Structure formats: structure tokens, C-alpha cells
Image (cartoon, grey):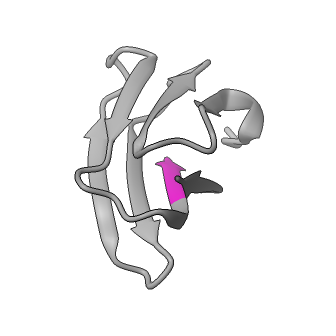
Amino acid sequence: INFVKNNYSLAPNPNNGSFTLTFKDLSNDISVEVFDISGRVVYENYFTQTANLVQDIKIENPSSGLYFVNIKSGSSIATEKIVIK
């Protein structure tokens, strides 16, 4: 099963360090990592496929700038860019 952009949405973007990931289909467990521009992990979590399809993500004390969100499901990975104001 290919995990593609159609399987989730991320909003709002830009944001203030809080955003929501909404999954349309959790056929596998999901891991979510958020990195800052220097590659430092600022958020990491793991959701089982029985978890709620809506996950609120909050980054503690974020600096404004560009961040990367890696969403992994099985052997598939998707990367989103977000802007924190």
C-alpha cells in the first residue's frame, strides 16, 4: 500500500507551532517527526493504526522559520514543509 499525500492533510500552515494532522486511512502504524532547518528533531511521536484519525501536534517553544514534517507509514514516507511564524 502506497502512503501518499491523499492519505492525510496538515493544517494550518503557516502556524504557531500547533497544527493538526488528519489521516484518511490508517492501514499501518504512523510515526511523525518534525525537524528544524538544521536537522534537529523538535517533535516525535508514534500512533497505532487504532489511534484517532485526527492528531494535534504541538511543538514546545518553537522558533519561527521553516520546519520539515516526516510522516512514515510502513515502508512509505512523506515529507511536508511547514512555516512557524
Q: Is residue 40 visible?
A: yes
What is the x, y in percent for residue 31?
Answer: 38, 47
Residue in the image at 42% along x and 68% along y: 35
Left or right: where does residue 72 sit relative to residue 11? left
The range drawn in magenta is 69-74
Nearest to the observer: residue 53 or residue 29: 53
Residue in the image at 51% along x and 57% along y: 70
Q: Magenta stretch: dominant SS? A: strand
Residue in the image at 50% along x and 78% along y: 37
**Farthest-out residue, bottom:** 38
Q: How many marks?
A: 0
Residue in the image at 48% along x and 28% along y: 20
Residue 78, placed above or below residue 36: above
Nearest to the observer: residue 26 or residue 66: 66
Left or right: where does residue 80 sit relative to residue 74? right
What is the x, y in percent for residue 12?
Answer: 60, 32
What is the x, y in percent for residue 25?
Answer: 58, 20
Left or right: where does residue 61 sit relative to residue 9? left
**Farthest-out residue, left:** 60
Nearest to the observer: residue 4 or residue 38: 38
Look at the image and tell me in which quarter the N terminus lies: top right
Asked if residue 19 lies in the magenta stretch, the reply is no
Left or right: where does residue 12 sit relative to residue 71? right
Q: Is residue 75 visible?
A: no
- Within the image, what quadrant is residue 79 found in? bottom right
Nearest to the observer: residue 55 or residue 76: 55
- Within the image, what quadrant is residue 16 found in? top left
What is the x, y in percent for residue 55?
Answer: 39, 25
Residue 78, placed above or below residue 42: above
